[in-house]
Amino acid sequence: MYLYVKQYYKPLFSILFWGASFIATKYSLNELTPVSIVFIRQVLAVLFLGTIAIKRKRSFAVRLKDHFWIVIIALIAAFHLWIQITGLKYTSATNTGWIIGITPVFIVILSMIFFNEKLNFSKGFGILLAFSGLILLISKGKITSLNFITHKGDFLVLASTVTWSIYSIVSKKATINYPPIMAIFYQFLMMALIVLPFIFSEKAFITFFHLSVKVWAAVLFLGILCSGVSYVFWVEALKEMDAGVVGAFLYLEPFVTVVTAWLLLNEEITILTLTSGLIIIFGVILVNRK
C-alpha cells in the first residue's frame, strides 16, 4: 500500500483535493459570492504558481500570439467555475460530485458533433446509462417532478460539465508554446483579471476583510491546494506516467466528494443517491473504455 501511494501520490492527492473542493466551496458560500470565490481562488493560485515558477527559474516572457488562446481558455474556465459555484449554492456537494463525473460523456458527444468521432455500441449504451443515472439522481426517483426551477442547482452544475467539456476540447486544439506550469499560471492570471470588474461592481472585495477563520481556511484550500498544488501534481503526473493510468484516478473523485460531504457537511448518503452515482460512473467507464 505504501509503495502504491508513493508511486501514484501526485494524481491521488490531486483527486483528493479536487474531490474535497466542493465542500470547501460550500463553506466559502456562507460568506462570499460565487464571483468572489472565483477571483480569490485564482489570485491565490497565481501567487503559488508564480512562486513555483521563480523557484524553478521559469521565464515569464510573454508571447502575445499564444495569449489569444489563453484568453479564450480563461474566458471559458471563468464562466465554467462561476456557474458551477452558483449551482453549488442550490444543491448538495454530494450531487455536485456525481454530476461532475458525467463530464467525459459530454466530451465524447461534442467530439462526435465537431470532429466526426464514431459512435459504437459501447459508447452509445454508456451515454444512455450515464444520463439515466443522472436523471435518477436529480429527480430523486421522481422523474415527473423534474424541472429547472426546483432543481436549478443541479442543472447549473450540469451546465458546468458542458463548459468544462468545451474547455477540454479547446485546450486540446489550442497552440500554446509555454511550459505547462506557465500556461496554467497565465490562464489563472487572465481569469482573475476577467472577473475583477465584477468584484468591484458588487463591492464584494470589502467582504474579504471580514471573513471568518473557517472560510479563510476553505478559500486557502481552494486557491493553494486545489488550483495550485493539484494542477502542478496533475501536469507532472501526465509527464511521468501513462495518460490512461492518470486519467483513471478521475473515477475516484465523486467518491471522495461523497465521503467528505458526509463527514464535514453531514450530507446523507442514501441508497438512491449511491445507486444513481454508480450508474453514472459505470456509464462513463463504458464511454471511455477504449
Image (spheres, grey):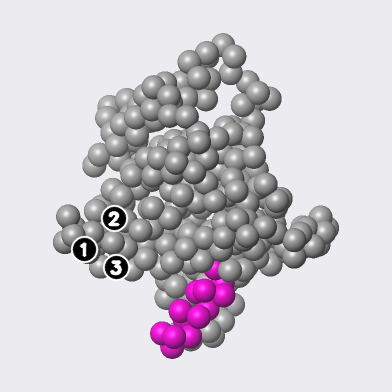
Q: Is residue 74 left or right of residue 101?
A: right
Cα–Cα span, label 1 and label 3:
14 Å
- Is residue 56 located in the magenta-colored stretch of the structure? yes
Cα–Cα span, label 2 and label 1:
11 Å
Percent position of residue 46, x then y: 56, 72
The boundaries of the magenta stretch are 45-57
Percent position of residue 224, x then y: 51, 66
> Is label 1 or label 3 in front?
1
Vertically, is 5 above or below 43? above
Quadrant (top left/top right/bottom left/bottom right) for the C terminus: top left
| Residue at figure coordinates x 32%, y 25% from the top left | 125
**Front one among 109 and 78:** 78
Q: Amino acid at mark 1?
A: Gln
Q: Is residue 151 left or right of residue 287?
A: right
Cα–Cα span, label 2 and label 3:
10 Å
| Residue at figure coordinates x 31%, y 50% from the top left | 249
| Residue at figure coordinates x 42%, y 62% from the top left | 230
Say which residue label 1 marks.
7
Say which residue label 3 marks.
239
Image disc number at residue 54: none
| Residue at figure coordinates x 38%, y 53% from the top left | 15
- Which class describes the residues within 10 Å of circle 2: few (<14), some (14-19), or many (20+)? some
Quadrant (top left/top right/bottom left/bottom right) for the N terminus: bottom left
Percent position of residue 91, x then y: 59, 34
> Is label 2 or label 1 in front?
1
Q: Amino acid at mark 2?
A: Val
- Is residue 271 located in the magenta-colored stretch of the structure? no
Q: Is residue 24 left or right of residue 90?
A: left
